[in-house]
Amino acid sequence: MAARTTTPEKRPGFFSQLKTLYTFTQKEYRWLPFLLAGIVLVGIALGVLVGFLLPQPAAWSIILWGVTGLLAGILIAMITMTRLSTTAMYKKIDGMPGATGHVLSSSLGRNWQASETPVGVNPRTQEALYRAIGRGGVVLIGEGNRSRLTRLVGEERGRVQRVASGVPVTVLYVGHGDDEVPIAKLASTIKALPKKVDRATMAAVIKRVSSVSQGLSSLPIPKGVDPTKMRAPRPR
């Protein structure tokens, strides 16, 4: 029997993550290196300009402001690349089975509880229904054809209302049609819901709803999105 190792798994370093982030984003936006270089150069130019505009400019002051502009340019370039990587990720997963679960599990923050595993699936067509619970109440998110999701939505809404009477239930559908939410705006749409539930009630709702959730162990779960591959890594 092979001996168990106690050595912790080595995580990618900062520069390794930064390289991965850049590679991921540059595949979608070929002009990325020119944009980042331009941002850094503009930062340096503004820093040097500030140094020249100061009363009685000195060489050391101009150099100092130039370095400050360089650092500011690098910071802004990294922020820009991170935002572009998020946009690139949404473009890649848009329309893929399981994309909704990936967004819910990684983008809602601590004020919401959600899972990348759907609470209901149509075994034949793979339409899926996901659920998020937070200060805005219970949100049911349908992924797939709306007409074929009607039964799943109705059943889950009924379960929620039986155990959490009075808690608002919002139904959203992911897509690009009328009254549908694009995958890129799903997280922001959910987080923008008005807060109608306090934290104590939220915890109780999570416990009650989880106790009556439909078991999905025997149902085929959409596996179109691999979060380890599709999520754009962020530098620590």
Image: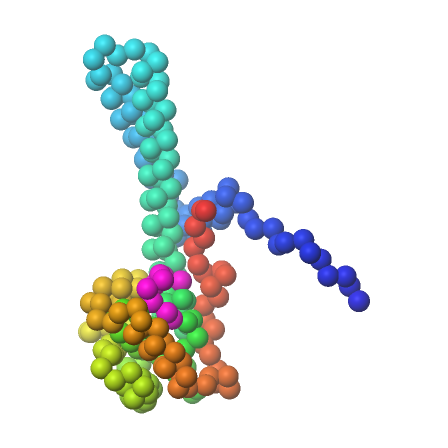
Q: Who's the residue at 24% across and 79% down the image?
A: 167
Identify the residue at image location x=20%, y=13%.
Answer: 55
Is residue 83 at all visible to an observer of this figure?
Answer: yes
- Image color mode: rainbow
Front in this rendered view, residue 34 or 112: 112
Q: Is residue 128 visible?
A: no
Can you give x and y, in whole percent of width and height, for residue 131 in the image?
Answer: 35, 76
| 187 drawn magenta | no
Picture coordinates of residue 189, whole percent (x, y): 25, 65
Depth check: 166 or 26 in front?
166
Is 142 placed above or below 28 here?
A: below
Q: Please tell me which residue is depicted at 35% across the width and 44% down the height of the picture.
A: 79
The residues colored magenta run 106-114
| Front position in the image: 57 or 198 | 198
Verify whether residue 111 appears in magenta.
yes
Task: Specify the quadrant of the image occupied by residue 213.
Answer: bottom left
Position in image of residue 204 (x %, y %): 34, 77
Q: Quadrant of the N terminus?
A: bottom right
Q: How many marks can you see?
A: 0
Q: Is residue 9 left or right of residue 108?
A: right
Residue at screen point 22% across, 82% down: 166
